[in-house]
Amino acid sequence: MQINLTPREVERFWSRVVKTETCWHWTGAQLPKGHSQMRAGGRKYYVHCISWCLANGEIPGSLCVCHNCPGGDNPSCVNPSHLWLGTVGDNNRDKVAKGRSRNNPARGEASRNAKLSNILVRQLRTAFPQGGHGQWVELVRVASKLGVCRTTVYKAIVGRSWVDVD
């Protein structure tokens, strides 16, 4: 895939990039999982693909542009030296390894939707050693205080959620 940008689009791209010693951070709007897109030539492109094309030219065949930042997973990075080409399979394996796959979502505190923390789950399990059986009124009170429903608290206590917390 070749991405042809006008000089104005190239300027707009670089105006949204902040370079550090390692990563080059995209400061424009981000999609929910941290990637970003930019409209160019009437189409939307992922900004890391634009960066790859600006530095290396065309993306061959059906290959994907993947991230490999030395400091860890950083989907907003557009530093061409942190990007590599891989197959769809390579990209899927990379997503799973980084916990960004739908089939392997981020768990516990790593989840963007987490309302509890590992420490809090341990405290709840200590406070309700029998899983809260017979203590529904107290579970409702605790859940209300935490801003979650009692089922969330109950599942965390009995280990049906937060399974990685010991």
Image (cartoon, rainbow, N blue to C red):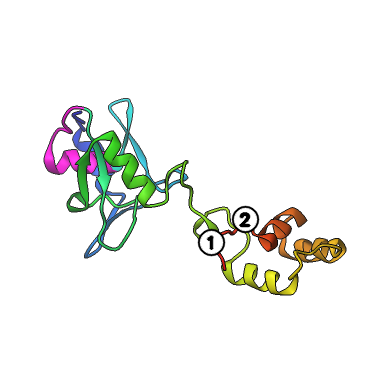
- Residue beneath the point at 41% across and 48% down: 34
Q: Main secondary structure of the magenta part?
A: helix
Relative image position of residue 38 (x, y in whole percent): 34, 37
- Type of the residue with mark 2: Ser
Q: Secondary structure at mark 1?
A: loop
- Residue beneath the point at 37% across and 52% down: 98
> Please, is residue 121 above or below residue 57 in the view?
below
Quarter of the image for residue 10 reads: top left
Label 2 crowd (10 A; few <14 / some 14-19 / many >=20): some
- Residue beneath the point at 20% across and 41% down: 85
Residue bearing mark 1? 164
Spatial distance from mark 2 to mark 1, Cα to Cα?
A: 8 Å
> Please, is residue 118 above or below residue 113 in the view?
below
- Type of the residue with mark 1: Asp
Label 1 crowd (10 A; few <14 / some 14-19 / many >=20): few
Tally of marks: 2
> Which residue is situated farthest in the top direction here?
42
Q: Quadrant of the C terminus?
A: bottom right
Query: 1 left or right of 153?
Result: left
Frontmost residue, 117 versus 59: 117
Residues in magenta, as a range: 48-61
Q: Is residue 47 magenta?
A: no
Relative image position of residue 161 (x, y in whole percent): 62, 55
Residue bearing mark 2? 161
Q: Is residue 51 magenta?
A: yes
Frontmost residue, 107 versus 84: 107
Quarter of the image for residue 63 reads: top left
> Please, is residue 30 above or below residue 57 in the view?
below
- Residue beneath the point at 59% across and 66% down: 117
Frontmost residue, 104 versus 47: 104
Relative image position of residue 9 (x, y in whole percent): 25, 37
